[in-house]
Amino acid sequence: MSRTLRVRQAQTVLPFGVGAVFDIQGESFVATGIGDWPQRAKQRVESTRLAARLGVTGFYAAPPTPNERYDVPDAPGAPYIRFPSWLFCGACRRMKRWRIADEKPGQPPRCPSCSPRPALAPMRFVQICSAGHLGDIDWWFWAHSRREATERRECTERGKLRFLVSDRASGLEALSVVCTAKGCGAVRDLLDILGTHGMRCSGRNPWQRANEAVECVKPVQIVQRTAGNLYYPVVHSALDIPETETAVYADETLASRVREHDLWVSLCKVAATPRAEVFREMIKDDTGADDALLDVLLAEETGQPVAAPSGLAAAPVRPDLSREEWAAFMAPVPPATRDFALRATTLDLARETMEPWVGLRRRIGRVLLADRLREVRALSGFTRVSPDATVVPADTARRLKWLPAVEVFGEGIFLTLDKDALTEWEADDRVRRRVAGMRADLDRAFQKDRLESLTGAELSPRFVLLHTLAHLLIRQLSFESGYTTASLRERIYARPDQDQYGILVYTAAGDAEGTLGGLVRQGEPPRLAETLLRMTEAAAWCSADPLCAEHAGQGFGNLNRAACHACALLPETSCESGNTLLDRALVVGGEQVPGYFEPIVTAARAAAAAALEQIPS
Ligand SMILES: [Zn+2]
Ligand SMILES: [Zn+2]
Ligand SMILES: [Zn+2]
Ligand SMILES: [Zn+2]
Ligand SMILES: [Zn+2]
């Protein structure tokens, strides 16, 4: 029976975008660069705003076609190739390096030696480097790596390897690669395979041709092909907001004026040298563009972040798109277009005179329901080893000016805090001290630049508060509505310099028409007020307390305070900032710090206690 391998269109940016390694039905593949995408069938994805900000001409999505013919050139769908190419037979334990010529369309690779012929399994380990390269491990070298170089030279048959498993040991120690070439028998187990072993980097990714390889001297790390540090996608996302601002268009016109300038090509050639200065000045004079725009355009054209002349800010790696989105949400009359349909609602607490409802009303500002949202997600590249490593562009050949993207439709709940209540809470010394500690950890964290693009130049109390609120709300909504947490996402609008103080929780359903109103229903009165109340009650306690509540730094880079898997973390795809910069204490209060919603928790407890006293014993 031939098998069907499917990657849904929405997955071609995340999680299976360019450079990602993934399993389908026991086979392992890597998504190739967009230079290999089918020319004819790709579909344009519109997002003028995102294109202008990223300095590209536009976006394309892979066609939403079943992808079983991934191994046929120019077949529809995003292209994938088999990786790792080293496979083994579970029956005879022979290892085989699979070549494209060995592929039989519609069939998994099968053992040439056994009968019946079982499907071959991919080796579990691969090698990566911080320049973003990925390659097969030289298993022959591994098997012979305990031998002297002279002994190694005596073995001349490179392909004869077996992948043995022993029942006398467990874990990696039980696995070994043995050379079965005549008179050799070299063997090494995999006990200490993870890490660096002085192996050479291939200087490329598996889909790149040998002549595209660069000389790479970065240390090679051996990792499992499913390891978290194998792939960090660089994804940008924009909501399709109505075109209220002309600024974006000014950028775009300016960008084309720069690209059409006589000296533009010359500038691109010398961008990294001191000679660039002269060209820059002339182009700036003639077009009216500023250094920031030139940096963005140069980075896009050359694929290299341009070191800005001293005294100027470096090119923004992740442009800030929050400004226009926030403006659209805060417009006096919420816009209602086909792909951005907002309507105002309230918590419906205006007539309440009792706590905790009065306190809740005082702390929440605007509530909007988005019946329809369109989001474009584009992939500009990826890194390996760490999120701060060298970015490999989605077009590894660096010829294309578009990016792979998908559009997703969904719905959402937008809410803001009450500005006065927030300002008052933020002025509290204990709040400032607590967040200053997080800021110090952030300064040390190696994802600093990436996170700063979300938090703004300074980590503010409101960012941590709103971010944690988004996480808690997503968890509570998921609990009450049946949405999985992975199907909900956050957007945090919390830059004090732009007077932001809100969040958007939305569905990101992928293809077609999105979801069917379930989330928006949760945002309608009286549900949202009740959900918020239950959320604050739930957040006051974590099953890992008192440990979790007292933590002075947990999670990635110690960037979280009172926040762990049991109480506040979300699936990776739901969070904009890698599950960092979270603290329940800022929401519901802690030993040393008042929470923004703390009075509500206290009032709710008091109300519950009073109700108990009313019951005659
Ligand atoms: Zn076999
Ligand atoms: Zn040998
Ligand atoms: Zn490398
Ligand atoms: Zn916890
Ligand atoms: Zn988050």
Image: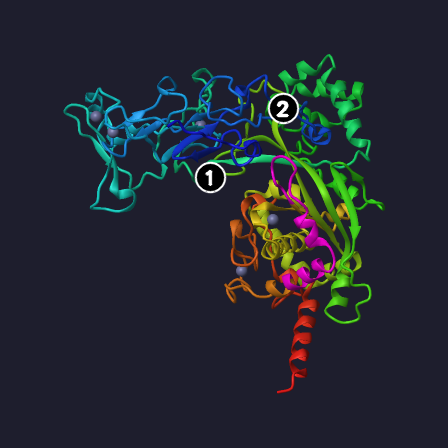
Asked if the stretch drawn in magenta spans residue 510, the answer is yes
Compared across the picture, whether 354 is left or right of 112 comes to: right
Residue furthest top in the image: 262
Name the secondary structure under disc 2. strand
472, 369: nearer the viewer: 369
Q: Magenta residues, as a range?
A: 507-535
Where residue 51 appears, as percent x and y from the top left, is 69, 28
**Residue 493, visible in the rendered structure:** no
Q: Mark 2 — residue?
A: 43
Q: Which numbered disc, 2 or 1, marks the residue closer to the eye?
A: 2
**Residue 365, visible in the rendered structure:** yes
Amino acid type, label 1: Asn
Amino acid type, label 2: Gln
Q: Mark 1 — residue?
A: 229
CB at mark 2 closer than 8 A to ligand 5?
A: no
Q: Residue at x 68, y 59 (%)?
A: 432
Where residue 158 appears, as percent x and y from the top left, is 25, 22
Q: Residue at x 74, y 23 (%)?
A: 255
Check contact, mark 2 vs mark 1: CB within 8 A.
no
In the rendered view, tell whether residue 544 sits above or below residue 294: below
Ligand 1 is located in which of the four quadrants?
Answer: top left
